[in-house]
Amino acid sequence: MNKAENKKSDDGAPGVFENLGRKLDHRPEVQAAEEALRQARTQFERAQEYCESVRQQATDGLHRLRDRNVGDVVSGTLEWVRKHPGTGVLSAVLCGFFLGKIFKR
């Protein structure tokens, strides 16, 4: 096979590799792989958007926290626990567990 056979001929006829590519494009395996890549790209883009929104929320929360004093933080935490007692107890248990693991030494 020479280079002329691999490229389109001067009269516009497709070359050997172009014909092979067209045949492969219609195979179910290739179409399934293309669809899987499309879905993966979509999911990756959604994950990027989600990570960006979480990062922005964390940044905003840190800025708000810096602007508050300890008394404001404690009163805000107590208010939150009054509104969500079950979650507050669970959070306290988890914090105690991790602090116990850290200071166990």
Image (spheres, rainbow, N blue to C red):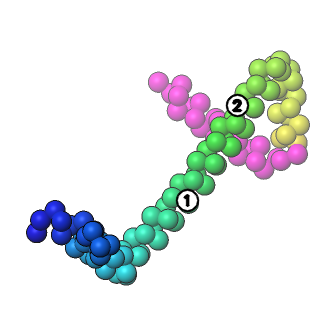
Q: Is residue 85 one of those drawn in magenta?
A: yes
Mark 1 element type: helix
The front one of 63 and 35 is: 35
Residue 22 position in % (x across, y down): 34, 76
Residue 37 in percent (x, y) is at: 45, 64
Residue at 53 percent of width and 54 percent of height: 44
The magenta-colored residue range is 83-105
Residue in view at x 47 percent, y 24 percent: 105
Q: Is any part of residue 93 visible from this angle?
A: no
Quarter location, residue 5: bottom left
User: Circle 1 sits on which residue?
Assistant: 43
* Label 2 Cα crowd, 10 Å radius (few <14 / some 14-19 / many 20+): few
Residue 2 is labelled as none
Name the magenta segment's main secondary structure: helix
Q: In which quarter of the image is residue 103?
A: top right
Residue at screen point 88% across, 28% down: 75
Q: As rendered, which of 88 and 58 lies closer to the eye?
A: 58
Q: Is 54 positioned to the left or the right of 60 in the image? A: left
Would you name the residue on which mark 2 appears? Answer: 59
- 60 up-or-down from 84: above or below: above
Task: Please name the amino acid that badge 1 sits on.
Answer: Gln
What is the spatial separation of the Cα atoms under label 1 and label 2, in whole angstroms?
24 Å
Q: x and y percent of residue 3 in the render?
A: 16, 62
Q: Which residue lies furthest to the front in this view?
A: 11
Furthest residue in direction left, as rendered: 1
- Quick one: label 1, few (<14), some, or many (20+) residues within 10 Å? few
Disc on the earlier residue, 1 or 2: 1
Q: Nearer the viewer, residue 2 or 71?
A: 2
